[in-house]
Image: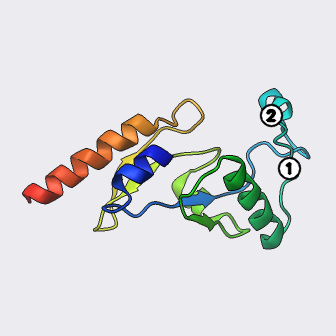
């Protein structure tokens, strides 16, 4: 994602929206997270969610601007984002690309193709 952000960041606004924790230690933890030391309880308030999001982005050495979903999980619910998903929203507010749900549907190369196609169509319109 960082590579795509660096390549298209001048032409497309990028955001990571941090939603509820998919595999918290106080619910359904997965072995990969245990092995990698990704061990967080489900945040109970905005401050806790911000702290986990910050740790996540720092841990991934990510520079993409991050937004935090409300504790009511509005973005997560409206975009069916859990556990993770990629979207390209056009300048008109319409969804131009929606990945399948992650982790198997999280395919940055498909997003990059969608961005390139969208920008090419915009320049010929």
Query: Is 60 placed left or right of 1 in the picture?
Result: right
Residue 79 vertical placement versus 34 (above, below)? below
User: Could you say whether the residue bearing mark 2 is in a helix, strand or loop?
Assistant: helix
Give the residue pinned by disc 2: 36
> Disc 1, disc 2: CB below 8 Å?
no
User: Mark 1 Cα within 10 Å, few/some/many (few <14, many 20+)?
Assistant: some
Cα gap from disc 1 to disc 2, whole angstroms: 12 Å
Residue 23, position in %: x, y?
Answer: 78, 42
Residue 4, position in %: x, y?
Answer: 41, 46
Residue at 78% x, 71% y is 46
Residue 83 vertical placement versus 16 (above, below)? above
Residue at 83% x, 46% y is 24
Query: Is 19 placed left or right of 124 in the picture?
Result: right
Q: Which residue lies furthest to the left in this view?
A: 124
Residue 122, position in %: x, y?
Answer: 16, 58
Residue at 48% x, 38% y is 100
Residue 107, position in %: x, y?
Answer: 47, 35
**Along the line of sight, the residue nearer the viewer: 85 or 65:** 65
Q: Which mark is residue 40?
A: 1
Quarter-of-image position of residue 12: bottom left
Residue 113 vertical placement versus 20 (above, below)? above
Residue at 60% x, 52% y is 62
**Along the line of sight, the residue nearer the viewer: 63 or 122:** 63
């Amino acid at each position: 994602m960082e590579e795509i952000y660096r390549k298209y960041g001048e032409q497309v606004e990028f955001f990571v929206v941090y939603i509820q924790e998919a595999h918290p230690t106080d619910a359904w933890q997965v072995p990969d997270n245990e092995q990698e030391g990704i061990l967080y309880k489900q945040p109970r308030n905005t401050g806790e969610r911000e702290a986990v999001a910050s740790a996540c982005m720092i841990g991934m050495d990510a520079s993409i601007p991050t937004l935090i979903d409300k504790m009511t999980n509005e973005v997560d619910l409206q975009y069916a984002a859990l556990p993770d998903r990629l979207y390209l929203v056009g300048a008109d507010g319409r969804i131009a690309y929606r990945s399948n749900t992650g982790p198997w549907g999280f395919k940055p190369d498909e997003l990059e193709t969608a961005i390139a196609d969208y920008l090419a169509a915009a320049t010929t319109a």
